[in-house]
Image: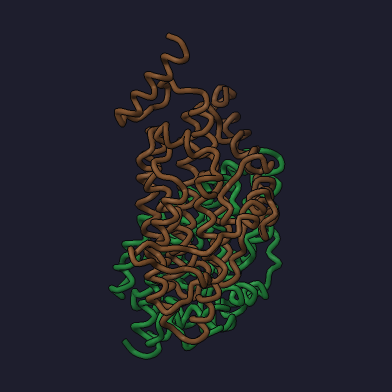
Chain colours: A green, B brown
Amino acid sequence: MNNALKNALLNRLIGMADDELILSHRNAEWTGHAPLLEEDIALANLAQDELGHATVLLGLVEELNGKTPDQMAYFRDAAEFRNVQFLELPKGDWAFTMLRQYLFDAYETILYNRLLTSSYQPLADVVAKFRGEEIYHLRHSHMWVERLGLGTDESLGRLQAALDQMWPLTAQLFQVSEADNLLSEEGVFPLAADMADEWQEIVLPHLANCSLHVPTHATMLLAGRETHTHFLNDLLTDMQQVARWDPSAEW
Amino acid sequence: MTEEQKTAEFEERIGRDEKIEPGDWMPEKYRKQLIRMISQHAHSEVIGMLPEGKWIPHAPSLRRKMILIAKVQDEAGHGQYLYHAAETLGVTREELYQAFLDGRAKYSSIFNYPSLSWADVGMIGWLVDGAAIKNQTMLAQCSYGPYSRAMVRICAEETFHHKQGKEMVLKYAAGTAKQRDMVQDALNRYWWPSLMMLGPHDSESTNTPQLVKWGVKTKTNDEVRQEFIAETAPELIASGLTIPDPDLHQDEDGVWHHGPIDWDEFWNVVKGNGPCNAERLGMRQDAHDNGQWVRDALEAYSEKKYGAAAFA
């Protein structure tokens, strides 16, 4: 693999791992605070699956850049993270959390399906393992969007507010860079922009069935994955404080 | 059959080590005691998610984070399982939970102590779960079938938590200076509350004699506490940590003797005056209040989708 291709792949792997790591962190914040005991259990489960995926993906990163998964998670600053912004936003209310999960699960389902045939075999292998779990994630979040959308006026109102806030940010999932073209040509990683239609075909009918209106105004000037909100700083302060308190220690 | 005859028959069954199952005749007092114990246990699991759950965002490695999320998830699962066991005695989870939120039901005193550092997660795993396992292993023998079976299952998972906590404490005890200080501080704060959580001395424990007679408890609080010290103290000492009890020693027969337990503190915490009683219950109340609209939406959705019959 030449250097340009390797760097492009690294960038994508880190993006995938960071998406999972950051979403896992947010979901784990519900543990002990969910609206039903059953959902404390469910959210902890999601968080573990996502953390597991992040760890495995960071293992692939390590093979390319030599940095351990813990170094990547605990000793990078916000500007070095490559997750999309809407995953780093605070967990919000239950409507926000479930809608975010749904929109992201739908995206991941498509991404994983495509990566199954990646010419980079280590990636195709790990994604084959993730896929089984992802089906359950999507089923869970799909059902929750439906229950809240078709529940009470309040639940619908909260869900709509969440959609208004995060919808413009979801476009970040489908951004592409120059280097991505290289990956796509080599069959390593699908062109993100090519997944947007398929994603919309999944989510738009469901959102409509759940009485939701997708915002039509597209005023958001989107930054790339290297740009973050201040919420990521806050999140990393939480996440990294013990590890950095004694960096010489083994934890 | 008279009440006395039924009671005599019931006690004979217990004498034969038979399990009492839901729907079997049982003295009202037995039923009440079991509801009290099982629901307190369930509440303890639910509130027990908080001191450790607070540290999930700060877990210093991916592995530790995974272990901790899984552990707190297990506690939620135990709570759920125990509420179901209590429901077999003719109460609902909702009424039990409401009594807990209102402060009418008790839960384990240990969860009213703060978790102040990351090392507390390890110390809670080793000491608190260790003490809980001692109690629960005994309760796995208890005469009420659903509680006994719940305990068998829960003990298996608790044993795992206990191992993980111990591994962490031992690692930090042999780690950097900062880690050693942190873990010693955690021991200083958790040793006495762990001894207290096994309950008052036998002489002060009003419920114990009846519970032993009916096969709900098979050992007294002091017996269980003694087992816990005998198992834990030597390993803590071997790790180089100092147990905060200058009177603690083993006599020539190998029996451990501990210094006086501050029962005033224990009763104060039980009565609701512990360092975190208000905070812990407040957080559960917040979660409950913030979740009300979600539960309302679920109910409304089910009625629309499946008709009012679903809730009849």
Look at 60% across and 30% down and name the residue there: B304
Look at 41% across and 58% down and name the residue there: B228
Q: How many marks?
A: 0
Look at 64% across and 51% down and name the residue there: B267
Q: Looking at the image, is B265 positioned above or below residue B214?
A: below
Task: Give left or right: position of B243 versus B218.
Answer: right
Q: Position of residue A13 (x, y in %)?
A: 42, 76
**Residue nearer the viewer, A119 or B31:** B31
Quadrant for the C terminus of chain A, please: bottom left
Quadrant for the N terminus of chain A, please: bottom left
Task: Give left or right: position of A220 versus B216.
Answer: right
Q: Position of residue A164 (x, y in %)?
A: 68, 57
Q: Position of residue B157 (x, y in %)?
A: 38, 53
**Residue nearer the viewer, B59 or A17:** B59
Q: Is residue A181 visible?
A: no
Task: Give left or right: position of B72 versus B295.
Answer: left
Q: Position of residue A37 (x, y in %)?
A: 54, 46
